[in-house]
Image (tube, rainbow, N blue to C red):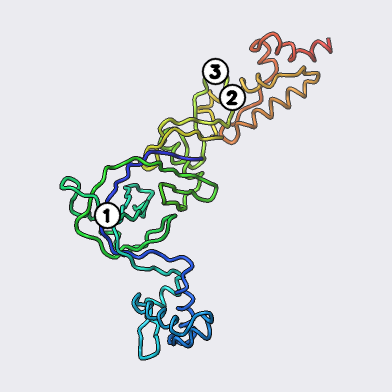
Amino acid sequence: MELKKNENVQIFEIIAQYRKQEKNAPFLSILKFAIENKDIISSNDLQNSLLQNFSVNACENLLNRMCFLRYFDKKNDKFQITERGKIDAQSGKIYLPEISVLRIFFVENIFVEQKIVKIETQNERNENNNSTQQTPQVLNNLIGKEISLKTGNYIIDKIENKCVVKNNRNELFTIQTSNQNSTIKILDLEYLIDIDEKTMKNAILSSKYSNYDEEKEFLKIKFDEKNNGNINFQRNILIEKPKIQNIEFEKVEIKDVEHIPATNDDARIWQEELIKSKINNYFTDNNEFKKLSEEVAKQFQPHYDLQPIYKEHLINRVDFYKRAKLETIDILTY
């Protein structure tokens, strides 16, 4: 099942100091090498054991660069790994610092905990007196937190107290459910939430129908003979405006929803119509109809304890063709 809606996205442009995760960074191998060597290495150690194709001077420059990034502290001709270097080595993630104008796409949605759904870098900030305002607290609250997007992972360290507010726009927000979990998607954000399809269906049906039993997962309905002759227990339901936690989505079809009669009287009418629908062949043995009637009665259990319907009850309640099929055994034994 896929739920869709248009989500209002706020857009801000702001100058920021941030770190972006570097994929396949050689720094990670160097940090792990330092830990294996009791936290202290030299450029000669690095050249001999890890970077044989580099000169000693190139290894020295690389370690000095890592000192600038606060991964090492230089002591004479040795380099000692810092606490930050140990943490990043253990996490397997290297973040390199940058400063630029960021265009940040922000949403307020209870299913989106991260709130930032896209980040773009800009060459400059396009501003005027009408679009510049105080940086909202919602952006300040995200400082220091890891932001995971399909385009990469970011940590924002510092932002200006003024930002440019761009026009909001609508973007497609989807929840794709499965038997184990659900996938949230909007712009560059995609992640799993621990809510399965069954839970989503129950939430939608409970919100829509007061006669839906969420625990037993069935919908109690009055049996309507005018309802296009629908006598199926499992039915697909088209819901025009499904809601989950007061969030409204586009129409969706929920498949195989169990329907049961609302009352015992509805069950008896339903039972009779169900038997009528199954009179398709000529009955040449009374036991054939008895078996059919018993099987239909069992379909209403455990909700209602109905007795099988006798053939004689139906004789005058069906059309000519079905009556002929019911009376076949009587004609053959006359």
Write down the residue under mark 2. Answer: 231
Q: Residue at x 41, y 83 (%)?
A: 60
Q: Residue at x 28, y 57 (%)?
A: 101
Name the outermost residue toward the left.
Answer: 129
Q: Residue at x 65, y 19 (%)?
A: 276
Circle 2 crowding by C-alpha within 10 Å: few under 14, some 14–19, many from 20: some
The quarter of the picture where residue 20 lies is bottom left
How many numbered callouts?
3
Q: Name the side, left or right, on which 242 lies relative to 103.
A: right
Q: Nearer the viewer, residue 76 or 141?
A: 76
Write down the residue under mark 1. Answer: 124
Across and down, in percent, residue 53 comes to 53, 79
Q: Secondary structure at mark 1?
A: loop
Q: Name the side, left or right, on which 229 lies relative to 73.
A: right
Across and down, in percent, residue 108 comes to 31, 47
Front disc: 2 or 1:
1
* Type of the residue with mark 3: Glu
Q: Secondary structure at mark 2?
A: loop
Q: Nearer the viewer, residue 18 or 287?
A: 18
Measured along the vertical axis of the image, is residue 182 above or below residue 146? above
* Type of the residue with mark 2: Ile
* Type of the residue with mark 1: Glu
Circle 1 crowding by C-alpha within 10 Å: few under 14, some 14–19, many from 20: few
Across and down, in percent, residue 157 comes to 29, 65
Q: Secondary structure at mark 3?
A: loop
Query: Could you tell me how far apart the alpha carbons at marks 2 and 1 are, in whole angstroms?
Result: 65 Å
Measured along the vertical axis of the image, is residue 218 above or below residue 159? above
- The earlier-in-sequence mark between 2 and 3 is 3
- The earlier-in-sequence mark between 1 and 3 is 1
Q: Residue at x 45, y 74 (%)?
A: 27
Write down the residue under mark 3. Answer: 225
